Image (spheres, rainbow, N blue to C red):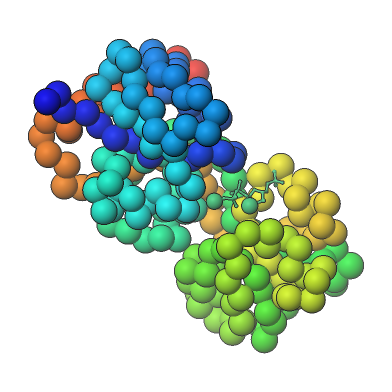
Amino acid sequence: MMTKLKIAVQKSGRLSEDSLKLIKECGIKFNNGRGTLKAEASNFPIEFLFLRDDDIPGYVEDGIADLGIVGENVLVEKSKGLDINKRLGFSKCRLSLAVPKSENYTDINYFEGKNIATSYPNLLQKYLDEKGINADIHEISGSVEIAPGIGLAEGVCDIVSSGSTLFMNGLKEVEVIFKSEAVLISSPDMPADKKEILNKLIFRIDSVLNSKN
Ligand code: PRP
Ligand code: ZN
Ligand code: MG
């Protein structure tokens, strides 16, 4: 059987459209019907798995996928022992602390003893430790920006891209704790035949990225 790479890509969300665009620009052809969670390229030895981005580092670590395209924020939060093969330059965003816009925020000490809702407890804890702040981290998996409005937390720590989600929820960004972009990841122990295909893919990605700068 011919060796194929399995690449995990976000099913829907900020990353998925740009991930598929990059694959297309690499000259790789495939059909993915709406709702299909698996697809195969017709002109390159690669198979696609469409998954939730948060699960991608885990799937790559377990060897279910050989590669993944994921936000660096998700990769670092899950802190798996994976390699970054390539920084992809799209889906740039930041992980930031935010508070209700009516609050009189002066500095990070504002958060001492406060309750903060986030989907990124590890990144947030590390940042607070560095700053010597004791706060109560409340982990939720989504709709984080709603937390202050419903009395769940006094602040939030979440991904900001355009800033419109914060704005719509009456919040203001007060500290940037991590800057992120999409990255291509793989397990460090990839067999030689797969590594060879990966190198071909990276060669194509490089040509696409170079033609943009
Ligand atoms: C992030 C974050 C907000 C949104 C912010 O979600 O949780 O929902 O993006 O973007 P904006 O500043 O442009 O309004 P993400 O795309 O990471 O999706 P997920 O939380 O569903 O994984
Ligand atoms: Zn996600
Ligand atoms: Mg979100």
Camera-side residue of 149 and 49? 49
* Res. 26 visible in picture: no
Identify the residue shown where x is 49% and y is 47%.
Answer: 52
Dividing the image into 4 quarters, which one contains the N terminus?
A: top left
Camera-side residue of 23 and 209? 23
Residue 8 sits above or below residue 167 on the image: above
Identify the residue shown where x is 16% and y is 47%.
Answer: 189
Identify the residue shown where x is 89% and y is 67%.
Answer: 102
Q: Quadrant of residue 107?
A: bottom right
Camera-side residue of 173 and 1? 1
Camera-side residue of 188 and 8? 8
* Res. 41 visible in picture: yes
How many numbered marks are there? 0
Residue 209 x %, y %: 43, 22
Q: Quadrant of residue 185?
A: top left
The reply, left or right, for residue 84 in relation to residue 76 is left
The reply, left or right, for residue 94 in relation to residue 11 is right
Residue 69 x %, y %: 41, 39
Residue 136 x %, y %: 61, 82
Residue 31 x %, y %: 44, 19
Residue 18 sits above or below residue 135 on the image: above
The reply, left or right, for residue 209 in relation to residue 43 is right
Identify the residue shown where x is 45% and y is 43%.
Answer: 51
